[in-house]
Amino acid sequence: MSRLLHTGQVIVDLVMALDTLPASGGDVLAQTASFETGGGFNVMAAARRNGLPVVYLGRHGNGRFGDLARAAMQAEGIEMALPASSGKDTGLCVALTEASTERTFISHMGAEGELSAEDLAGVVPAADDYVYVSGYSLLLDGKAQPLIDWLLGLSRQIVVIFDPGPLVKAPESALMRTLLPRIDIWTSNGPEVLAFTGAADIATALPLLKRHLSADTLLVVRDGPNGCWVGRGSAIEHVPGFKVRAVDSNGAGDAHAGVFIAGLARGLQPAEAARQANAAAALAVTRRGPATSPGTAELNTFLSS
């Protein structure tokens, strides 16, 4: 059976809801505040809740936040390939969600910011596995090169999924030039693909993005409540979204990615997997917190209604 092997970073979010961010040097009161496991956990939880076995290949710390991260992964049935790291705790992200549903992140990496060739040496993906790569990993000096070397050594049968995230803004770096030909699935939101290509809109960005990738790379570009664009080559189609009352956009893209991969693993065609992913993202934004993806039963009920 296929698995999702996640090479990104599980961190702990300090989630706070507020009306609007203060000006620099200002002060506001948040309506809510809680510690929640987030980062790469969001994608893994979404995939696991929809029937796909998941293995976390990253490191996790040995302190308070590491304990929270491990408890959350264990509760979801996510396997951890590595033991707790010594000497460092898991990192922290302050996630601020405004009343508009816009979110702002301030992150500090911990043990998950490092990964060695030795850490990855014991991981043997199967031919039908999906390997998930986060753009954040390419920005981490203690992780990027060993990860790229490991990815390039994988069989071409293994599907490599790349999520650039908001901080990977251009294809010119040596690491990106090395990774781009190995990407089988690109998944991102609209602003991320605009930043990466320099285009003014998604319609213009899609052909520019394809120039950097292999001809058969599957593109998935989310467009908020409008749904997403999905396809290969010239056969890219728009899959409509679902109208809901949003309260928190944090984790919606991760829910989309995890459910989309789970759908592909079940044999769905990309457009149908994208429809399920759009529904998952729609449900996710109606809840507060990072890992708010629905499970299969709730998703099917929503789609049937």
Image (cartoon, grey):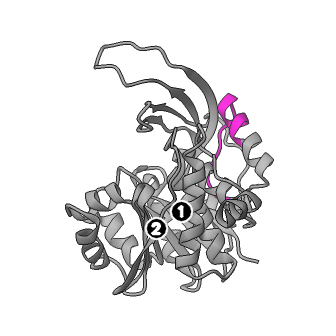
Above-or-below relation of 143 to 148: above
Camera-side residue of 178 and 168? 168
Tag 1, which secondary structure?
A: helix
* Residue drawn at the location 59% of the way across and 80% of the way down: 158
Q: Which residue is mark 1?
A: 278
Q: Amino acid at mark 2?
A: Pro
Above-or-below relation of 36 to 286: above
Side (left or right) of 304 relative to 157: right
Q: Which residue is mark 2?
A: 240
Q: CA distance from mark 1 to mark 2?
A: 8 Å
Side (left or right) of 149 relative to 268: left
N-terminal-most mark, 1 or 2: 2
* Residue drawn at the location 80% of the way across and 46% of the way down: 75
Tag 2, which secondary structure?
A: strand
When asked about the image quadrant of residue 13, the answer is top right
Question: Crowding near pointer 2: few (<14 within 10 Å), some, many (20+)?
Answer: some
Check if residue 57 falls in the magenta segment.
yes
Side (left or right) of 244 relative to 2: left
> x%, y% of residue 270?
54, 79
* Residue drawn at the location 61% of the way across and 37% of the way down: 90
Identify the magenta region. Answer: 56-69
Q: Tell me whether circle 1 and circle 2 mark residues in contact (CB < 8 Å).
A: yes
> x%, y% of residue 305?
67, 62
